[in-house]
Amino acid sequence: MNDYIEVRFDITPCDEVATDVMAAILCDDGFESFIPDERGVTAYIKKELFTEEIINRAIDDFPMENAITYKYVLIEGEDWNSEWEKNYFKPIVVKDKCVIHSSFHVDIPTLEYDIVIDPKMAFGTGHHATTSLIIEQLLEMDLQGKRVVDMGTGTGILAILANMCGADYITAIEIDPVAHANAVENLAINKASNVNLIWGDAYSLGLVKNIDVFIANINRNIITQDLQFYVSSLNSGGEVLLSGFYESDIPVIMQVAEPLGLSYKSHTVKDNWTCLRLIK
């Protein structure tokens, strides 16, 4: 199981803009998850990718005049589940239609969609704005009989919801072996039998065709790099849901998307993060 480095950034003065900007900078250097609060942000990166140079560069690149201090600690893989369950993962309700919780939670409300997620170093529990924004979009879409791709599936949460919403067939792709193994478990817990889970990256899309809805909640750089592969799998009239970046990044995404035949349809925003909806 992967070991992670937990880096705590204290930002003075601190607000949502400051924590979001720091998260965006760190995301480009391999950090995978962020937990903001009123004093700063806690960020996680795989141990093998971590250097103090990354942290110092992020502070140097921070465009505001806030004072920033940091400290870091090793989180061993076997300790992750208990730490996550104890400190971070609480049940979440989206649009009064979908409840997301872990197998150890009790007193869960009865809603139309009930998703069980047991995260094991695989981020994607619905708490981050990018995940909840996509969940909101999926709950509004008609997925009956549709073919869906969930790129960078993580815990499998979005693929599981697509299955519950009536998608005919879902391809879920994850490059991280620990996240892939976690997705296998979560798909089984939720009885998502029509999800084909692939361990790989965008090149795995070579044999994936006739997709109606393509989901990618990753980050801006990977999306712009791989968007051509997403489009090649998509039917004419198919839709793309993209997140993992800020509303201010939409022009950067569209600069790549429009030459590939994608048109803007809409976008939603939460805490400066956005979900961009495009159509081919």
Image (cartoon, rainbow, N blue to C red):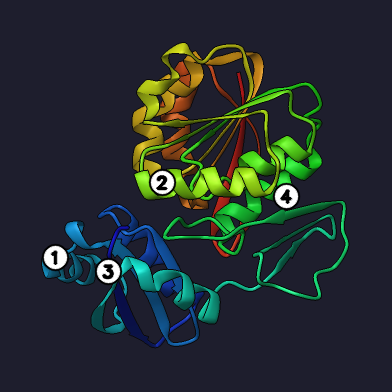
Please give left or right for residue 130 compared with residue 18 in the image: right
The answer to whether mark 3 and mark 2 are in CB contact below 8 A is no
Q: Closer to the observer: label 4 or label 1?
A: 1
Quick one: SS at disc 4?
helix
Task: Name which residue lies at 22% across and 65% down.
Answer: 61
The answer to whether mark 1 and mark 3 are in CB contact below 8 A is no
Q: CA distance from mark 3 to mark 2?
A: 18 Å
Q: CA distance from mark 4 to mark 2?
A: 19 Å
Q: Nearer the viewer, residue 106 or 65?
A: 106
Lower position in the chain sequence, tag 3 or tag 2 = 3
Question: For residue 203, what is the image quadrant?
Answer: top left
Please give left or right for residue 190 compared with residue 248 in the image: right
Question: For residue 191, what is the image quadrant?
Answer: top right
The answer to whether mark 3 and mark 4 are in CB contact below 8 A is no
The answer to whether mark 1 and mark 2 are in CB contact below 8 A is no
Q: Nearer the viewer, residue 118 or 92?
A: 118
Dot 4 corresponds to which residue? Answer: 136
Lower position in the chain sequence, tag 4 or tag 1 = 1
Q: Closer to the observer: label 1 or label 2?
A: 1
Dot 3 corresponds to which residue? Answer: 62
Quick one: SS at disc 3?
loop
Q: Closer to the observer: label 3 or label 4?
A: 4
Q: Nearer the viewer, residue 190 or 146?
A: 190
Task: Name which residue lies at 43% across and 49% down.
Answer: 179
Dot 1 corresponds to which residue? Answer: 51
Lower position in the chain sequence, tag 3 or tag 4 = 3
Task: Name which residue lies at 35% across and 84% down.
Answer: 11
Q: Amino acid at mark 2?
A: Asn
Q: Amino acid at mark 4?
A: Glu
Q: Amino acid at mark 1?
A: Thr
Percent position of residue 217, x then y: 51, 44
Task: Name which residue lies at 32% across and 58% down.
Answer: 1
